[in-house]
Image: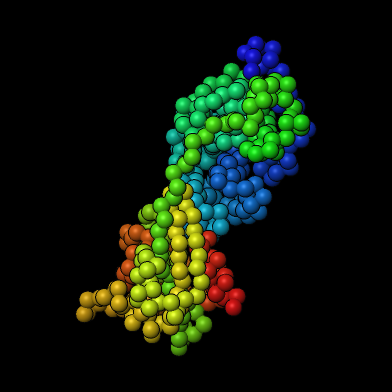
Amino acid sequence: MSSSLQEKRQLADRLVRWFRGHQRDLPWRRTKDPYHIWVSEIMLQQTRVDTVIPYFNRFISLFPTIEALAEADEADLLKAWEGLGYYSRVRNMQIAARTIKEQYGGRMPDTPEEIGQLRGIGPYTAGAVLSIAYGKPVPAVDGNVLRVMSRICLLYDDIAKPAARVRVEQLIEDIIPEDAAGDFNQSLMELGAMVCTPRSPKCGDCPVRELCSAYAAGAVDELPVKSKAKKPRHEELAAYIIEGTGEHEGEVLLRRRPKDGLLARMWELPNEHLSFDAQRQLGLDERFFMEAEHVFSHIRWQMKVYRCKDHEADQVLGMRLPRREAEPSVLEAAATYGQANQAPSDAKPSVSETAPDHEAGQPFDHEEEYAWVSADTWRHHALPNVFLRILGQYFAR
């Protein structure tokens, strides 16, 4: 792309006019409220727009202000986020909301220095909020923007490297119009999402085709350059649907994850790391229910799910999980916990402030928090997607 002032202005003007005439009607675009824009940008990380829309609307109805988010019960937050994944996002949002409430009177700060200090807000989210809500000429560089700018400017920098993002931010700082910063940033995002796509870009529909260096050079399909991400680590797990009898007939046992680490404080089926070969050798095949998979950015869980009755649990699990002579069984511990923490069947679970640290797939611990759930109550608990699928299939039988 030529560096002449005239062409820079032409590029910005074309993008802004195109965006104003072609932008999608999205709920967070109907407002300049920085809180709404912040929520939408966090939700849109690693998540498709069509998926986010109902979550955004529900979240804003439940937590309409920064103060409401700051004061929300964590169990309610996790439940509202259930299905979006990457739960650390919403936890970080609440931490940031509390900071905003305490230090800024509940108003989102409007300088790069202040907003950049908030938990979970990086350069992209800061740029989006500052430009869209406050009209500040600050770049907001996400994957779409990196791709669009790599093609417009014929950049062969590896966009997986931080240096490429810095370079693109510098280029945008030189182009972004002060009187239309928000629309300019959104035009780059929208162009990347709708026209300048990773594969089969619609160059015939592009408003800046004549200014695109990659198009002129016939190099659109070569860009952007992006090194391959490291494959997630493969882990094999066994998960257990422990079916209640007697007073717990028709119910299954859930366990709450610890307060720190992956999927902190969410509910799950009891599970442990155990290779598929070991599962076969232990004779679990006859109790097999289904297979399931869950992919994180760095881990891929391959899981086999087994069923057993509560009175069989110690026999089934005790082969690998011996307990001390005076130690209660997992079922005894769960029953004791349930009696001491009895709640109405329609009540949401409370968050324990003393949940022990615990890694994913570790053996059962009688000090952990358990809950019996039925077909009517299991959805009251915030569960990772993989366990939502498993329990949905189980209770739909």
Percent position of residue 164, x then y:
50, 27
Q: Is residue 287 above or below residue 216?
A: below
Q: Report the front residue among 197 and 116.
A: 197
Q: Quadrant of residue 138?
A: top right
Percent position of residue 140, x then y:
57, 31
Can residue 182 be seen here? The reply is no
Q: Quadrant of residue 143?
A: top right
Percent position of residue 254, x then y:
44, 71
What residue is rendered at 47% in x and 52% in y?
A: 296
Picture mark count:
0
Q: Which quarter of the rendered picture does the C terminus lie within?
A: bottom right
Q: Report the front residue among 8 and 106.
A: 8
What residue is rendered at 40% in x and 67% in y?
A: 276
- In this view, the residue farthest toward the bottom is 246
Left/right placement of residue 181 relative to residue 346 reads right
Q: Quadrant of residue 339?
A: bottom left
- In this view, the residue farthest toward the left is 325
Q: Is residue 255 above or below residue 294?
A: below
What residue is rendered at 37% in x and 68% in y?
A: 277
- In this view, the residue farthest toward the right is 21
**Coloring scheme used:** rainbow
What residue is rendered at 45% in x and 65% in y?
A: 303
Can residue 300 be seen here? The reply is yes
Q: Which quarter of the rendered picture does the N terminus lie within?
A: top right
Q: Report the front residue among 91 and 10.
A: 10
Percent position of residue 128, x then y:
58, 34
Q: Is residue 183 above or below residue 375?
A: above
Q: Report the front residue among 184 and 212.
A: 212
